[in-house]
Image: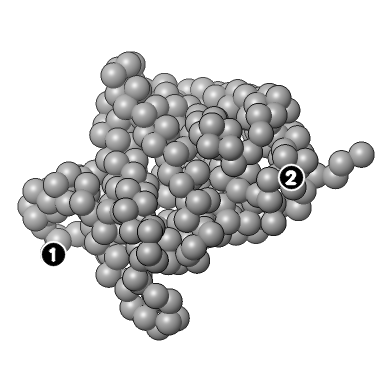
């Protein structure tokens, strides 16, 4: 009988910091526009990543034959994905948006199969589908429906697709770069998309008027959810493959709900606890089902 694989601590940390990320962003929006937040985080991350790489003596020069791939990866993962998400969430309800974004692991599995990183596995698909149902129950169980604009819902769905292909590309780059190098080298590509998106809002922001709480939240988005979160996520992709790492994405929405309950006093309904149990069962099922393929393809090494 196959045993459930040990949890990846790096990815569990990602779940925690990205789970609070949603709460931090919502609070920061009271003082800053989404465009200004997005560009400020990108610039702050890049400004800190450069000295970190220098201190750790990690090369910031793309290796021969990978420069365009790294640039394209950054444009997708640190640029287009975030732009589509921020734009979509302006008109999508919180519940619909969370469910749309929770489809990202399904896109990752699809792209990984198409690129022959993994074999198609019915157990993985069924487990992922169960986890998606659990996420839906967590979100809808809290009465989170706040919007009905189908166009914005589709934009959030497209951001999930972009994030899915980004995770697969990160697996390819992991053969040539460390997680920190992957993140740092991706930033210029992301800024190509992010600067036109957020420049006007960034320049019009009254930075001196921001409260200490807003600065603390922005620091969290840059350091914890940004640098730490993405570096640990790419580490997880390197360790267990893109589809395996993306299964942890299903845990983020329930984590956000639990943190909202613990930190903001927002009560959880019985149906949400049931949804959380379904998410955990679905992720466990899918993780267990992909063990043979992961070993065969080397994704679990």
Q: Which mark is residue 296?
A: 2
Q: Position of residue 199 (x, y in %)?
A: 12, 51
Question: Which residue is most to the front?
Answer: 65
Q: Is residue 291 above or below residue 206?
A: above
Q: Position of residue 74 (x, y in %)?
A: 33, 52
Label 2: which secondary element: helix
Does 279 appear above or below 44? above
Whole-percent x and y of residue 212? 27, 64
Residue 46 seen: yes
Vertical relation: 263 (above or below) 129? below
Task: Pick whichever, 1 or 272, lies toward us.
Answer: 1
- State the quadrant of the N terminus: top right
- Would residue 257 appear left or right of 187 to someone viewing this image? right
Question: Residue 208: which numbered mark, if any?
Answer: 1
Could you say which quadrant of the image residue 223 lies in? bottom left
Q: Name the foreground residue: 76 vs 279.
A: 76
Task: Name the residue rendered at 53%, 59% in the picture.
Answer: 175
Q: Nearer the viewer, residue 139 or 78?
A: 78
Earlier in the chain: of badge 1 and badge 2, it is 1
x, y percent for residue 266: 50, 38
């Amino acid at each position: 009988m196959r045993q459930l694989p040990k949890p990846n601590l790096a990815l569990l940390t990602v779940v925690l910091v990205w789970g609070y990320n949603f709460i931090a962003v919502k609070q920061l929006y009271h003082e800053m526009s989404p465009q200004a937040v997005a560009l400020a985080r990108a610039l702050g991350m890049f400004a800190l990543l450069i000295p970190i790489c220098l201190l750790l003596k990690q090369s910031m020069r793309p290796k021969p034959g990978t420069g365009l791939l790294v640039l394209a990866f950054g444009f997708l993962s640190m640029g287009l994905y975030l732009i589509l998400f921020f734009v979509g969430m302006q008109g999508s309800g919180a519940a619909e948006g969370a469910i749309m974004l929770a489809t990202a692991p399904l896109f990752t599995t699809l792209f990984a199969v198409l690129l022959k990183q993994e074999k198609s596995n019915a157990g993985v698909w069924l487990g992922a589908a169960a986890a998606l149902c659990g996420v839906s129950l967590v979100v809808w169980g809290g009465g989170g429906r706040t919007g009905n604009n189908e166009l914005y819902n589709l934009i959030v769905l497209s951001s999930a697709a972009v994030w899915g292909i980004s995770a697969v590309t990160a697996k390819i780059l992991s053969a040539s770069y460390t997680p920190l190098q992957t993140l740092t080298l991706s930033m210029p590509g992301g800024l190509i998309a992010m600067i036109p998106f957020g420049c006007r809002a960034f320049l019009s922001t009254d930075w001196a008027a921001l409260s200490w709480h807003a600065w603390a939240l922005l620091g969290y988005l840059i350091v914890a959810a940004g640098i730490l979160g993405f570096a640990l996520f790419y580490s997880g992709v390197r360790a267990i493959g893109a589809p395996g790492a993306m299964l942890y994405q299903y845990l983020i929405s329930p984590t956000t709900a639990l943190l909202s309950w613990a930190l903001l006093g927002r009560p959880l309904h019985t149906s949400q606890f049931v949804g959380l149990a379904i998410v955990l069962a679905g992720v466990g099922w899918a993780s267990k089902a992909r063990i043979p393929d992961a070993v065969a393809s080397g994704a679990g090494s």
